[in-house]
Image: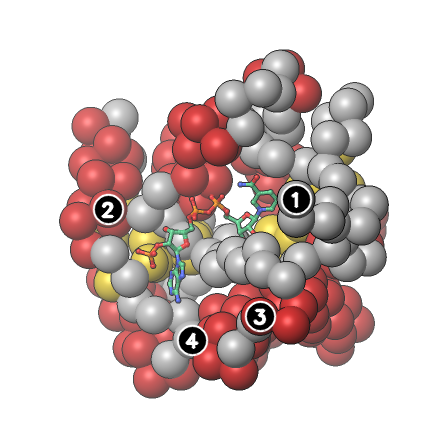
Amino acid sequence: MAKIALVTGAGRGIGRDIAERLAREGFAVGLIARTQSQLEETAELIRKAGGKALVTPTDVSKREQVLAAVDKVEKELGPISVLINNAGAYLKKPLTEITEDEFDFQLKVNTYGPFFCTQAVVGRMAERGGGTIIFVLGSETRGGPAQYSAYTASKVAQRAIAESVAYEFMHRGVHAATLDVDGAVDSPRVREAMPDTDPSHFVSPEAICSEIVHLINQPKSSWTFGVDLRSYVQWRPRVAAKKKA
Ligand SMILES: NC(=O)c1ccc[n+]([C@@H]2O[C@H](COP(=O)([O-])OP(=O)(O)OC[C@H]3O[C@@H](n4cnc5c(N)ncnc54)[C@H](OP(=O)(O)O)[C@@H]3O)[C@@H](O)[C@H]2O)c1
């Protein structure tokens, strides 16, 4: 099977790490995010390391843009055999303060986005007899911590899509799996936001990338459909929001 991957949210953070790792594994990588300059940076890192990358600035919540990006990647790199649904929007806000637009936005990026991306590639994968689709989820799909209601709703819906895709397409050779990252992932942004947390308590991005490579390489006879990655320290607050002083 052609080694062509499409990674959403590849402009920074976990998506950039995944794109770089897949390129090191020999994949030509289509890069999706809205900010072109960040995608160019990711592509440059991949090319400097000897890999191949194509920048396709795209808003995953816009179906026409997703279809155009997938067509461009398939035309210029080849048939997509791996899709990583990683792009995400994040909102922490008290329930009573979340506006309709904010709620819509979470659903548009975290639910419609992976739905559109999957819809654009999965039929072609099935026609070719194989492919892997991975959905990068977070702790919120296991129950809603305080102040994450919109984000949680959108991620739970993404899990539902992932599980449906798995059962709808497994017999046609397409492996869909959820990768639930149950904790904060180590990055400069997270270290800055959580200065009091011991960095060894964060989930390692290398471990996420290795898990993705493992899922991609699994034999059809023995697929994993859901993976939980959790640090040995469960840092994420699952208690009620503290009252404002
Ligand atoms: N970081 C963590 O601790 C953590 C923990 C558990 C799970 N996760 C999950 O891991 C994924 C990546 O998180 P991250 O921390 O790496 O996020 P991040 O640093 O904020 O990066 C998000 C990426 O997604 C892109 N993106 C956002 N909205 C988009 C849209 N509408 N269309 C296309 N691309 C879009 C962003 O680029 P543009 O803004 O330029 O579009 C960026 O490249 C998310 O799904 C998140 O829920 C993260």
Number of the front mark, 1 or 2: 1
Pinpoint residue 147: horizontal percent, then vertical percent. Answer: 67, 58
* Residue at numbered disc 4: 61
- Disc 2 marks a residue whose amino acid type is Gln
Q: Which residue is drawn at 27% across and 40% down?
A: 42
Number of the front mark, 4 or 1: 1
Query: Residue 97: which disc?
Result: 3
- Give the quadrant of residue 95: bottom right
Task: State yes or no: Cβ of the residue under disc 4 lies below 8 Å from any atom of ligand 1.
Answer: yes
Question: As drawn, is 235 to the left or to the right of 57?
Answer: right
208 lies above or below 70: above
Task: State yes or no: Cβ of the residue under disc 2 lies below 8 Å from any atom of ligand 1.
Answer: yes
Question: As drawn, is 199 to the left or to the right of 234?
Answer: left
Is residue 117 in view? no
- Give the quadrant of residue 23: top left
- Disc 1 marks a residue whose amino acid type is Ala
